[in-house]
Image (cartoon, rainbow, N blue to C red):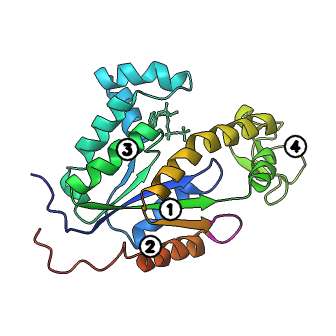
């Protein structure tokens, strides 16, 4: 059975670079926005685990760091929007990733009575580089240390295993800068597209503030933008 959306069911589209705390925020936002966190990456991984046709098509592309075709993710999202648990709203994470996906999404949402809003978590890239490139990991137990905020007792040695700590390949500065650059070139045109389409856009400084405070700021901005009005008289 299709969900009975109120005419103003919020569809919050979350953007944030690697290291911006997007994962944490998408969990915290559930305090003010009921409804599922829809991550196309998670959906694709579920298909890969199931070994079905979608999983087989996606696995090779994901492993080689490429995007899955627009038609495939658009179809997955269209089906997901019609599930009953979306009745109070949704948080979209990792979608849209291309302009075509953004256009399809903006056509789809009103068809299912969703109202879009964009949340952009902004963090100073130099801070992200400093934080991620200061991370060290134990190759035996996986514990993460930070040179600045959470160092091991003996520099370079795991407190639990005594093993020599390593820098993960994806925490090397050049790799981080490359990923941030890719994120920027992918996301900037999509944010511009939403701006031109007059979709309400909430820009919040991520950074070093407590995650709960940042989430509170996002929720109050969404309320001010009229996206989180209490829903009255909805027939479910
Ligand atoms: P990451 O943030 O590490 O890229 P995700 O979980 O968001 O992780 O996505 C994992 C992979 O799944 C992506 O690298 C891409 O191959 C594929 N993917 C996820 N979402 C999309 C999308 N909207 N469009 C195309 N491919 C996607």
Asked if disc 2 and disc 1 are in contact, CB closer than 8 Å, the reply is yes
| Residue 224 placement: quadrant | bottom left
Asked if disc 1 and disc 4 are in contact, CB closer than 8 Å, the reply is no
Residue receiving disc 4? 156
Sooner in the amino-acid sequence: mark 1 or mark 4: 1
Q: Position of residue 192 (x, y in %)?
A: 53, 52
Q: Is residue 62 left or right of residue 75?
A: right
Mark 2 → mark 4, Cα distance in angstroms: 44 Å
Disc nearest the viewer among 2 and 4: 2
| Residue 137 placement: quadrant | top right
Q: Residues within 10 Å of mark 3 (few under 14, many from 20)?
A: some
- Residues shaded magenta: 205-210
Q: Which mark is residue 211?
A: none
Disc nearest the viewer among 1 and 4: 1
| Res. 129 visible in picture | yes
User: Closest to the observer: 26 or 96?
Assistant: 96
Mark 1 → mark 4, Cα distance in angstroms: 38 Å
Q: Is residue 220 above or below residue 60?
A: below
Mark 2 → mark 1, Cα distance in angstroms: 9 Å
Q: Which mark is residue 119?
A: 1
Q: Is residue 232 left or right of residue 92?
A: left
Residue receiving disc 3? 103
State the residue at coordinates (14%, 79%).
233
Q: Secondary structure at mark 1?
A: strand
Residue receiving disc 2? 222
Q: Residues within 10 Å of mark 2 (few under 14, many from 20)?
A: many
Tell me if the residue at label 1 has its CB under 8 Å from ligand 1. Answer: no
Q: Secondary structure at mark 3?
A: helix
Q: Residues within 10 Å of mark 1 (few under 14, many from 20)?
A: many
């Amino acid at each position: 059975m299709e969900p009975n959306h109120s005419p103003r069911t919020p569809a919050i589209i979350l953007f944030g670079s690697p290291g911006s705390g997007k994962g944490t925020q998408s969990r915290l936002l559930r305090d003010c926005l009921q409804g599922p966190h829809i991550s196309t990456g998670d959906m694709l991984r579920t298909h890969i685990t199931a070994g079905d046709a979608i999983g087989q098509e996606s696995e090779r592309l994901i492993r080689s760091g490429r995007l899955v075709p627009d038609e495939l993710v658009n179809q997955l999202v269209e089906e997901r929007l019609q599930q009953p648990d979306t009745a109070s709203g949704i948080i979209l994470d990792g979608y849209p990733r291309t302009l075509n996906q953004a256009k399809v999404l903006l056509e789809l949402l009103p068809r299912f009575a969703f109202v879009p809003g964009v949340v952009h978590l902004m963090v100073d890239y130099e801070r992200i580089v400093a934080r991620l490139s200061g991370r060290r990991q134990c190759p035996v137990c996986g514990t993460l240390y930070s040179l600045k905020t959470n160092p091991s007792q003996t520099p370079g040695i795991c407190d639990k295993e005594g093993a020599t700590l390593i820098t993960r390949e994806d925490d090397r500065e050049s790799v981080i800068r490359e990923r941030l650059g890719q994120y920027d070139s992918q996301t900037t045109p999509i944010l511009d597209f939403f701006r031109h389409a007059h979709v309400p856009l909430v820009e919040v400084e991520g950074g070093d503030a407590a995650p709960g405070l940042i989430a509170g700021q996002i929720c109050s901005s969404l309320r001010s933008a009229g996206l989180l009005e209490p829903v009255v008289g909805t027939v479910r």
